[in-house]
Image (cartoon, rainbow, N blue to C red):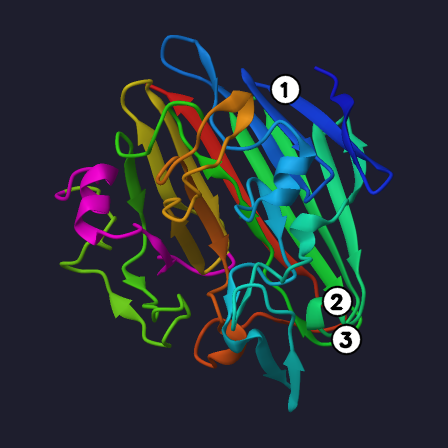
Amino acid sequence: MPIESFLFDTHEGRPVEGFILSAGGLEATVIAHGARLVRMMVPGRDGTGADVVLGFDRLSDYLASDAYFGATCGRYGNRIGGASFTLDGVCHELAVNEPPNQLHGGPEGFDRRVWEAEVDEAENAVTFTLVSPDGDQGFPGTLTASTRYQLSEDGVLDIRMTATTDRPTVVNLVHHSYWNLGGHASGDLRDHRLTVRGGFTTPVGADLIPTGEVRPVDGTAFDLRGGVGRGRVELGEALAAVGGFGFDHNWCLDGPVGELRPVAMLEHPASGRWMELATDQPGLQVYTGGYLSEKMVGKGGQPYRRFAGLALESQRFPNSPNIGHFPSARLDPGETYRHRMLLRFGAV
């Protein structure tokens, strides 16, 4: 089917375009504000489709929210401790939006911008491009970033993020959809199953900044590996075991960094829907929505509460620019940053 374009809204007098991609019984809607996925229709075992991502109907609600629903976060997704880092002997002070730290690129991160859009009908893809000037939110170098969404007939949403720079900088583009395979209006996640192929996590302090330790998950609530001899991991049981606000932690993923490999599986037994994530990144932030506002109202007037959706954010590790033994997030002129996510959907 041809890609359908429409006007989603306007922002500061500028049109915010939207695009609907259809293939293989799936339908993905993306918009230029935040290079954002706002709707994902997936059929269940009975053939009934459901919108499986959280979001809003109006741009004003996205602007008023700090949930980052469906957005491309940058220049550095996740947290940088103390909102600063040193590169080549120069300390860069960043814009603070989670005192005293920076989260997802700062108060005016990439999720707050209107990106340029280009449609590729032949590939059933839309590419969004953004130029971030030198000094933007405190980061050095002019960065040109892109996010490409492609939907294929075999039930795969392919998300590719790239960036280039004219000065040494750091970059970590992160896709931030919240998934609920029962449908965005179905309640919370505790009827899902989740497996994550990662044998280690990076523990955090009270401010959610990694301590620098890399800790095995064996025998802890963070062992979500499932598989042969382990059984599937019931997300409700895992959330009860970890307690509090649930998961908002980085897993060190198994397998070679830079190679695309399956790293996570989310399943919803009641509808039969499943989603497999493959990525080329070293880490995966698993965030179970524990900090969602109890007063939040989403699409169609649906209240969203704690644990309403699950973000699976493949990434460089949080605070990597300040922790030398973490995988590097440095990008130099002449290099291209690449980050790929393959989201495969099905039903049983």
Locate residue 192, reporting x and y percent. Answer: 29, 32
Locate residue 66, reporting x and y percent. Answer: 55, 49
Which quarter of the rendering shows the N terminus?
top right
Q: Secondary structure at mark 3?
A: loop
Q: Earlier in the sequence, mark 1 or mark 2?
A: 1
Q: Is residue 68 visible?
A: yes
Q: Which mark is residue 136?
A: 2
User: In the figure, 267 relative to 51: above or below?
Assistant: below
Disc 1 residue type? Ser
State which region is magenta: 229-258
- In this orientation, which residue lies closer to the viewer: 171 or 248? 248
Disc 2 residue type? Asp
Disc 3 residue type? Arg
Report, in whole angstroms, how far the alpha carbon at label 3 lies from the one at label 2: 13 Å
Q: Secondary structure at mark 2?
A: helix
Residue that label 1 marks = 22
Q: Earlier in the sequence, mark 3 or mark 2?
A: 2
Q: Earlier in the sequence, mark 3 or mark 1?
A: 1
Pointer 2 local density, CA inside 10 Å: few below 14, some 14–19, many at least 20: some
Residue that label 3 marks = 167
Q: Secondary structure at mark 1?
A: strand
| Foreground disc of the pair 1, 2 | 2
User: In the figure, 151 relative to 331: above or below?
Assistant: above
Pointer 1 local density, CA inside 10 Å: few below 14, some 14–19, many at least 20: many
| Residue 86 lies in the magenta stretch | no
The residue at the far front in this view is 295
Report, in whole angstroms, how far the alpha carbon at label 3 lies from the one at label 1: 39 Å
- Horizontal side of 58 relative to 240 (left or right) equals right
